[in-house]
Amino acid sequence: MSINIPHITSIASSSIEAIDIKTITFRFAGCVAPGQFFMIWVPGIDEIPMSVSSFTKETKAITFRNVGDATHALYHLRKGDKIGIRGPYGNGFTLKGKRLLFVGGGTGIAMLAPAIEEACKKKLETTVIIGAKTQNQLFFEKRIRRCGATVLVSTDDGSTGYKGYASALAKNALKEEHIDAVYTCGPEPMMKTLLSYCKTIPFQASLERYMKCAIGLCGQCCIGKGLRVCLEGPIFDGATLRTIKDFGSYRRDAAGRKILF
Amino acid sequence: MTDLNTAIGPLRLKNPTMLASGIMDEDAGSIQRMIELGAGAIVTKSIGIHPRDGYANPTVIELEHGILNAMGLPNPGIDLYGKEMNVLKKTEVPIIGSIFAATAEDFVTLATKMQGLGAAAVELNVSCPHAKHYGLEVGSDLSLVYDIISSIKHHVHLPVFVKVSPNMTNLVEVAQTIENAKADAIVAINTVRGMKINLETGLPILANKTGGYSGKAIKPIGIRCVYDIAQTVHIPVIGVGGITNGEDAIEYFMAGACAIQVGSAVYYRGPEVFHHINKEIAQWMRKHNYKKLSEIIGAACR
């Protein structure tokens, strides 16, 4: 059967990571690469793209903030409840070099975590910056320390770690150490700032756009000159992002209207 | 040299492969990519007077032999879409503005704006099978269809194409009405109304429950419709429905189409599909000693 039709599975477990942030794990066999995403169907509500936040051969997990109709419904599902899954979609990260810097802003750290674990497993020198608004929105810090990465934390209000933006912390890290490549997911203005610090350093960022088909057909998620975030993304490299006006400036809503970041 | 030039009434195309409405045509950047990859003409997303979000997801799923969708006519409205059209003003490939509305008056407003935005023609969406008050609901009322076409022809000098639905049993009568109203071409077909139910949940998968079926499975339906229409009217017919390769296109030409549109095959073969289909048409023509498309068009109708 096609991967492009929802396969029904049930929630195997769920856990609260921080205020309004939850991980749900579901049975779904098959391979997935760090950075890829699934379309998650909550029957009767909506279907939304969600990057994988951890996986085994038999199970996959997503980690999300309770912000909209679909995530609200997902947040309140219990063990055994049914959801539909199609995918995996997108290109995933390509890890290059020996000293890597990961920068996750807000829930962005969720999809970076599997790539970080892969980097640590490959014995690459891995530094991770986790940025959150405030201490009680911070998550995955322990999980990432456990895999052997160096973790730096920033909060906008200074309630824990460095007071300020993750991008500022990254600027320091890039100055002080030699970094071979930067990987990021988070608010786009933050990622754009980060790209400006990476003039010669390879850079990969995961983008988020309103998606409909997720198979490269409808054009809803296109950026720049018809680049499909669902198919040619969601991970784009620095060279590509520098040519894309949309990056860090605007996204499009369901009607195709530009919404400034 | 094999000549892939074709004409739809007054409109000249460098090749017969057009991008069908609703595929990779929401913004100027995507359209530019389709042009660079060889599309002979572009049909825009169907645009209305006001912005519309369309339906909640799931809006698109792939079935065994085709694709089922119910987007719900999402579009930013003609005024915002005009900003995308303005970026494309210098392009030489014709941009055909697909428009939808519920009344002749709104259709005229949209067509007039499309003319101002540099569209080479308008394509009237009176055939979308899953939008309340629009599309097929308008197309089912033949006196309204007649009124819409003649009102536009009265106010606007762009060629008017009318996209028809295979879900109508009186297609010949529909085609005659369109010709009598002085439209310039008929586009056949829009998607075939369909549904997919998930067994585990007992629910239709599409949020709108029903949708339109496209892709490989619907080609014989499209061929039959184009053939019936070409037998009935004298105005040009544009074929669309399940065209994935050069031979599919040739079959539509033989049924009477003077150009074809490609939608779902952008998924099956990627955006390079226009380049592939054109190459395959030319190869087939060389192999069979044809020099011009006009030698093939309507071959099955004689």
Image (cartoon, helix red, strand yellow):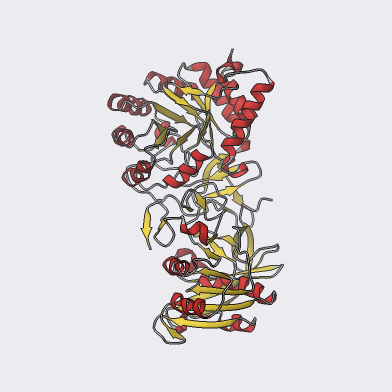
- Left or right position of B149 against B186: left
Image height of B245 relative to B75, above or below: above
- Left or right position of A176 against B83: right
Count of marks, rendered view: 0
Q: Residue furthest top?
A: B302
Which residue appears at 56% of the width and 36% of the height? Answer: B274
Query: Residue A168 placed where, x, y %?
Result: 44, 77
Which residue appears at 41% of the width and 85% of the height? Answer: A158
| Front-lying residue, A8 or A93 | A93
Q: Residue furthest bottom?
A: A160
Q: Quadrant of the C terminus of chain B?
A: top right
Which residue appears at 46% of the width and 76% of the height? Answer: A171
- Left or right position of B93 against B250: left
| Front-lying residue, A210 or B225 | A210
Query: Residue A22 placed where, x, y %?
Result: 53, 75
Q: Quadrant of the N terminus of chain B?
A: top right
- Res. B170 in view: no
Query: Residue A225 placed where, x, y %?
Result: 47, 48
Image height of A91 relative to A156, above or below: above
Query: Residue A260 placed where, x, y %?
Result: 36, 60
Which residue appears at 37% of the width and 20% of the height? Answer: B182
- Res. A206 in view: yes
